[in-house]
Amino acid sequence: QVQLVESGGGSVQAGESLRLSCTTSGYTASNGCMGWFRQVPGKERNWVARYYIGGDSKYYLDSVKGRFTISRDRAEKTLYLQMNNLKPEDTAMYYCAARDGDGCAGWHREEDFDYWGQGTQVTVSS
């Protein structure tokens, strides 16, 4: 059974930083993909950053490039999202996700991912 558990959310001022963590258990896809998505009430859940488990490829939403960094500690089985220079428009519930199928480049929709965490709230005030 795959379990993803996020932590690290909170309320910050614009310009500040947060680091989200996603601890995993039971996820064994050696060429799969993990990612961070976010969702605000009434809107779709959209991807923010993705990490290819089989290599070191990383993908970012244009609006977070240069501010967010996705990384993974293989030994700790933990996925991170370092978020710097946060903006009010980054306010959302952030979800960790994992995909069993091979590859990461072309997979960015909510329905492309098989496993989800419960989410952690990030609130950025101006």
Image (spheres, helix red, strand yellow):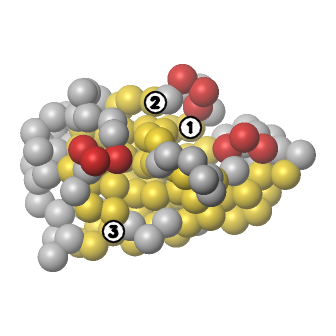
| Residue that carries the numbered disc 3 in the rendered image | 4
Q: CA distance from mark 2 to mark 1?
A: 8 Å
| Residue that carries the numbered disc 2 in the rendered image | 60
Q: Residue at x 44, y 40 (%)?
A: 47
- Mark 1, other Cα within 10 Å: few <14 / some 14–19 / many ≥20: many
Q: Residue at x 47, y 48 (%)?
A: 45
The reply to whether callout 2 and callout 1 are in contact (CB within 8 Å) is yes
Q: CA distance from mark 3 to mark 1?
A: 20 Å
Q: Is residue 18 above or below residue 126?
A: below
Label 2 secondary element: strand
Disc on res. 17: none
Q: Nearer the viewer, residue 103 or 113?
A: 113
| Residue that carries the numbered disc 1 in the rendered image | 68
Label 1 secondary element: strand
Q: Earlier in the sequence, mark 3 or mark 1?
A: 3
Q: Nearer the viewer, residue 37 or 34?
A: 37
* Residue type at the position of mark 2: Tyr
The reply to whether callout 3 and callout 1 are in contact (CB within 8 Å) is no
Q: Is residue 96 above or below residue 58?
A: below
Q: CA distance from mark 2 to mark 3?
A: 21 Å
Label 3 secondary element: strand
* Residue type at the position of mark 3: Leu
Q: Position of residue 113 (x, y in %)?
A: 26, 50
Q: Residue at x 41, y 63 (%)?
A: 22
* Residue type at the position of mark 1: Phe
Q: How many marks?
A: 3
User: Which corner quadrant of the image does residue 120 belong to?
Assistant: bottom right
Q: Nearer the viewer, residue 75 or 80?
A: 80
The outermost residue toward the bottom is 1
Q: Earlier in the sequence, mark 2 or mark 3?
A: 3
Q: Earlier in the sequence, mark 2 or mark 1?
A: 2
